[in-house]
Amino acid sequence: MSYTIDVVAEEPSRLDWPALEGALDERRLRVVEAEEVDLAEPWPPDLYVHAYLDGVSTRTVELNRTDTGLSVRVMTASCHEDVRLALALARAALDRGGGTAGGEDGLDLDALDDDWVSGYVDSGVLSVCAMAAREEQPLRIPGPLRTTSIGRRVIDELSAMPEEERVAGFIEVLRRVQWFEDESTFEASPLQIAGTTPETPAMVWGPDVRMYFPGYDHLLLERGGGGPPMVVRVADVPEFAPSARFLDERAFVIDAIPADEWPALLERAAVFEDGGYLPSLPASPPPESPSPQPTDRPWWKFW
């Protein structure tokens, strides 16, 4: 679960963002609300902002300027760097405003050391995996830029790893969804087909474009010549486009296919064409993956 550190300051008015940011001297530090809030202005009470490290974070660190100081909240499934960022911000606030600081369970700030950080990250990962293994639908974990889906596919991927690598593997799943992009990658926007319900959006893909698809049920392939697109289920995409790489339970990246190779891809995809794509089409489940043989207790079950 999340964990909150409260700084009760002697001088709360001194807790402004420029001072905290300057104390950390971290070039990768960003704030989600930077374009909505003037962070250079005095920080009013009850303002919530979410900090993260560009290219690194899996979750955000929530900061709430309270009447008495600053509340710093670490989210479940945060990576080690996110937790250390939260601790650094709490220490910077304590140095700036004076007073006292401690965790929600009464631990002093100094007690939240590297061992505590590792334990918190490990327990968060196991908690999320345990919930994902029980739920029929994937869990959705918001991050700085995108939401990651964790379900059976990801659990099976982690289960195939050596036990000591699973926490790092989970963090990598979240991180590759947040930070996969480069200048050559375009992020697909959901396209609502006329007459369909909001539950059945689709995405469009054509030649010469490397795309990130955030995880809807259907993909529309451009046929060219002004004809209607070919509709395929996302679950079938790897069968005819081997470059498709799933990042989490449903989101994936496909490398660009040159225009002269596009007709051949359409031929392969035709086997999987979903001619029954109708307004009432229900969401398709993710593909089944063979589960590991059961043991006395699954690796993600810590009770």
Image: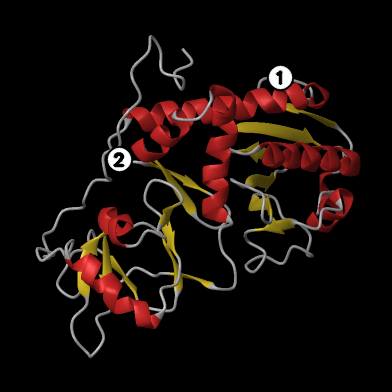
Residue matched to label 2: 137
Q: Which mark is residue 282?
A: none
Q: In the rendering, at what x and y percent does residue 133 appear?
A: 36, 29
Q: Is residue 231 left or right of residue 113?
A: left
Q: Is residue 2 left or right of residue 214?
A: right
Image quarter of residue 276 = bottom left
Q: CB atoms at circles 2 and 1 under 8 Å apart?
A: no
Badge 1: how crowded within 10 Å, few (<14), some, or many (20+)? few
Q: In the rendering, at what x and y percent does residue 59 appear?
A: 59, 45
Q: In the rendering, at what x and y percent does residue 51 appear?
A: 68, 51
Residue at the (83%, 37%) spot, across then down: 91
Q: Name the foreground residue: 200 vs 219.
A: 219
Q: Is residue 268 left or right of residue 10?
A: left
Q: Which mark is residue 106?
A: 1
Counting the numbered discs, the total is 2
Q: Secondary structure at mark 2?
A: loop
Q: Nearer the viewer, mark 2 or mark 1?
A: 2
| Amino acid at the residue labelled 2 | Gln
Badge 2: how crowded within 10 Å, few (<14), some, or many (20+)? some
Label 2 – label 1 distance at C-alpha: 36 Å
